[in-house]
Amino acid sequence: MWIGITAGVVFLVTLGLLFYGWLVLAGLRGCSRPAPLRRVILIGLGLHASMLLVPPALSDDPLAYAAIGRAMSAYGRDASEELGKSLPKEDPYRQLIEVYPRWLAYGSAYGPGFNWLAKGAARTGGDNVQLTLRLFQALCLVSLAAAALVTAQAAREAAESSSRDESAARAAALVFLSPMALLEGTANAHNDSFLAVGMALFVLAAVRRRPIWAIAALCGAVAIKTIALLPLLFYLIHLCRSWILPSWRPKGASLIWMLSGVALVCTILFFWVAMPILQDHLGTTALLLGSKNAPYPMCTRSLECIPRALLHFVMGMPQASWYLGLLFRAASGVLLLYCAIRAQVGLSALGWMGGFLFLHLLVLQGWSQPWYTLLLLPLLQFAPRAFLPAMLMFCVSGPAHYALDFPLDCERRQWLFGLSEFVEFLMTAMPPSWLLWKQHKAGQLAAQQA
């Protein structure tokens, strides 16, 4: 236990140092100018290369990626098939994934684009599981470097002529030197690193006012992971509003009430009409949305976990807990519609999109994992000034919860598991929420929205 506590403290200190260095090199702390672009890339390559010294250690997801690719490349099985059925027991990937029995009941929850990448990595790695995991790490490093360079080009083109070099360097630093990119991108090899490339290409297309290319970039991201549907829907709704009703600027309160009704109806229709189709054809993805008969609420490290856990475990009302989850999904729909409609045409729409994704991940994402924030990194350069401090903090508070995993990862006592979930939520959500509250008290959020 004491070894785990010591490791957790060392992890938090290291994370804090990475955070401070990130802010300094991005020109957001200590000096007004970011480091030159070339220096940002060289420092980033050095830091990311150091993450390759050990295989992924803080998450079992990369092992699942490798197992999915192995089932496809070696045995010709479908990616969505349960790993317990698609991999024979003597397979080296199966023997390792059995340490995490829950994965044996699932197949791929990802898009065809990522399944293709996983198949290629597993084919290259062959029977060497560690080599396959290293390939995923290398692919994530390359993806994040590409995302940083593309975002830098977008920031250069969007900035005034006198500040183009600084804007490009800051944009690259915000992506490539982020502790989130280092830990969850390269070290833990999460496939959300590929989403960062899609988002960076979208940002570049949006800056150049090429909506077709912007939509294509987001569709490419959706082919990796379904969470990219959020920015795609945002952008499509924003385009429709700007083309059909370019001068429409509804007032906030009336718009929220109208959108609340629309979102509630859409949520009900989705779960009663589309959910059975998802369960038949995308079963693993549908599991992330939960079920009325699930043994526990499908949420972690999120605000909704608290009332849903009380309803499910304390009051013995699992169906009421699930319906409450539907209300949170409807609230996310309201926020998406509100931000997409209120966003002005031009670069400010990128700020509105970044604000929406941040608030969704902070408050309304039921199954909240820190690596989802990799999707947000290319938008930080264009984030509303009032939101930026909280968004930066979120990139650090997310992985901070790993400090608890060092001493408690092997614990199986239910009360301690529930307590650690609550503390992880506080560690993840409270620091950025406090910064948002400070901006609200100072009147900055209202001024930004106006």
Image (tube, rainbow, N blue to C red):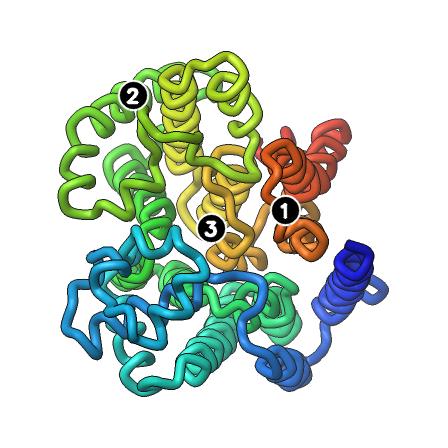
Say which quadrant the C terminus sits in: top right
Specify whether 148 is left or right of 425: left
Relative to 122, residue 287 above or below: above
Q: Residue 389: horizontal and vertical position, in percent?
A: 70, 48
Q: Can residue 133 be seen in this view?
A: yes
Q: Which residue is drawn at 36% across and 55% down?
A: 103
Q: Does dot 1 land on a helix, a strand or a loop?
A: loop
Residue under numbered circle 3 = 350
Query: What's under tag 1, amino acid-wise?
Result: Glu
Which residue position holds label 1?
Answer: 411
Can residue 160 be seen by looking at this rendering?
A: no
Identity, as a three-letter code, of the amino acid under mark 3: Leu
Tell me which residue sits at (43%, 50%) in the image: 346
Between the residue at mark 1 and the residue at mark 2, the CA separation in whole angstroms equals: 44 Å
Q: Name the residue under label 2.
A: 262
Locate residue 248 relative to residue 441 in the image: left or right: left
Q: Are marks 1 and 2 in contact (CB under 8 Å)?
A: no
